[in-house]
Image (cartoon, grey):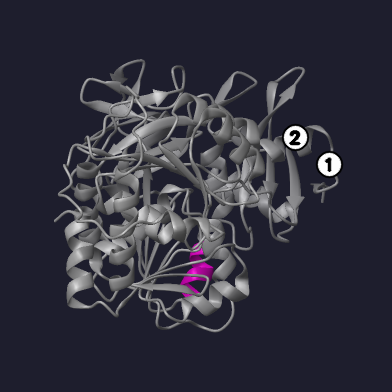
Amino acid sequence: MPLCNAIAIHARQRPDALAVSISGSPLTYGELHHNIARLHGALVALPRHPRADVLLPEDARLFAFAAGNHPSAATLLAAALATPHAVQLLDPHWPDALHQQTLAKLPPDVIFCLSTQTTLLAAADHLGIPAVRVDTSDFDAFLAAPADIPWTVPSDTFLVGFTSGTTSQPKAFARSRQSWRISLDASREAFALTDQTHTFAPGPLAHGITLYAFAETLDLGAAFHGLTHFEPAAAHRALSAARRIVAVPTLLSAISHGSAQEHIREITTAGAKLDTTILGKARTTFPNARIHEYYGASELGFVSLNTHGLLSSSAPANSVGRPFPHVSLSIRQNGQEVPQGSPGTIFVRGDLAIDGYLWGGRNSGFRREGPWATVGDIGRLNNDGSLSLLGREGGMVITSGHNVYPQEIETALAEIPGVEGAVVLGQSHPSRGQEIIAIVGGAVPLAEIKSQLAIRLPRYKLPRRFYRVEAWPLTSSGKADRAALLTWAETKDARLAAVTA
């Protein structure tokens, strides 16, 4: 059933039920549906900008949204899901120049942003793009009388998203309604979701894991809880009304403390490998929750799933699980499939992959080989059919003639009790080519770390230098900022403490 029908049914049957609450700004299903209808009426009245790279129905408009987790996101993002219009989802943390370049490449029919985003407003004015400041009375003034929402077409685009992948320049991709409809059906079953699965997702709505949780929750008729900005006390208040958490591992770790939260029944995490330390903290804080760790990508959709119970996991804990039912995997090197257990590029065959990037990514990221698609991740298929991640194409470290994948060392470090996060990098070295360095959190003695690694890894994979970090630098999506850490190591930044004993 299309999301437009789902939201309309929820609004008709339970108009007073909570649909969305972002930092205490609530909307019921009746209010949300009314707002969507008003926004639809306003959008269809706008002049349509000619464009060739994103095809939309005649009565649809492309609007940009750059206001992050402002409460207006509830109406604007729901409208993209439930009307013929499409959203161009801009990350508010991008530098001004990147916002300007993106608007020039793909001018939307209107942009919704904050009054504090003055450079973005100036760029929109220069390009002749109407701008609506959602944190002022402009937004309500823009909305029109409610208009009947037409049926959406499965093949139409509803989202223009962006992913940086292995490069600093975002790559643009389009998502069809049908691709997420298939995903929603798959995740409802895989994650055991119902209309009582009220979800707390503390991350940015500009990133896939949070936006998808928003769509899942509205499709079910449950309540979605988010935050304008992450703050631990506010997060714990929002948790009290939820039964499910959706978060990247770093944010899951940030809320996995304090008294046991026995009302949380399901946790979904993705975006980075869930290490055993965070898994242990989450199991303690949320003792009644199953923890669903999935591997996927914006370009590929769901790939594999590992569900962790209190005492055991559906696949080895250091893996990212086994393929979803609709997915086949192929591990390849130089176009040829490698034997089981050997490393190679992960290729996926399923019905959720995009056709290609709208721009960017010519030499990196997503590509196809016939029906198979990849984003350049390196992995191996284990004897039990589970998938292990090793790194990303171009991220391999070559040290003294050996090929080493950082993810394999990071996984081994994460298995050591007391290690609270680990990042492994290759640093230039005059004789070895690259030298493996490890940055770890926690207070485990270096001798213990080295002895544990020696059990798990061959000698040539052991890091030559170790550093400790008190506070991890994070990207806007909540992942460890590897580029910043490498800069800190190369410049001997005081935020990295060399460990020698």
Q: Quadrant of the N terminus?
A: bottom left
Is residue 243 rendered to the left or right of residue 429? left
Instruction: Residue 62 in the image: state x and y as whole percent.
Output: 36, 38
Q: What range of the chain is rendered magenta?
A: 278-284
Q: Which residue occupies 72% across, 56% down?
A: 471
For label 1, the residue is 493
Give the number of the disc on residue 487. 2
Asked if one can make out residue 169 in the rendered structure from this viewpoint, the answer is no
State which tag comes first along the sequence, 2 or 1: 2
Q: Residue at x 15, y 49 (%)?
A: 151
Along the line of sight, which residue is nearer the eye, 284 or 341? Answer: 284
Q: Is residue 283 magenta?
A: yes
Work out whether 169 lies above or below 46: above
Q: Are marks 2 and 1 in contact (CB under 8 Å)?
A: yes
- The residue under label 1 is which amino acid type? Asp
Nearer-the-camera pick, 373 or 227: 227
SS state under label 2: helix
State the image quarter where residue 158 is shown: top left
Report the magenta stretch's main SS. Answer: helix
Q: Visible in this render: residue 342?
A: yes
In this rendering, the answer to whether 107 lies above or below 75 is above
| Marker disc for residue 95 | none
* Callout 2 amino acid: Thr
- Residue 160 or residue 436, whichever sits in front: 160
Going by the image, does 463 lie left or right of 298?
A: right
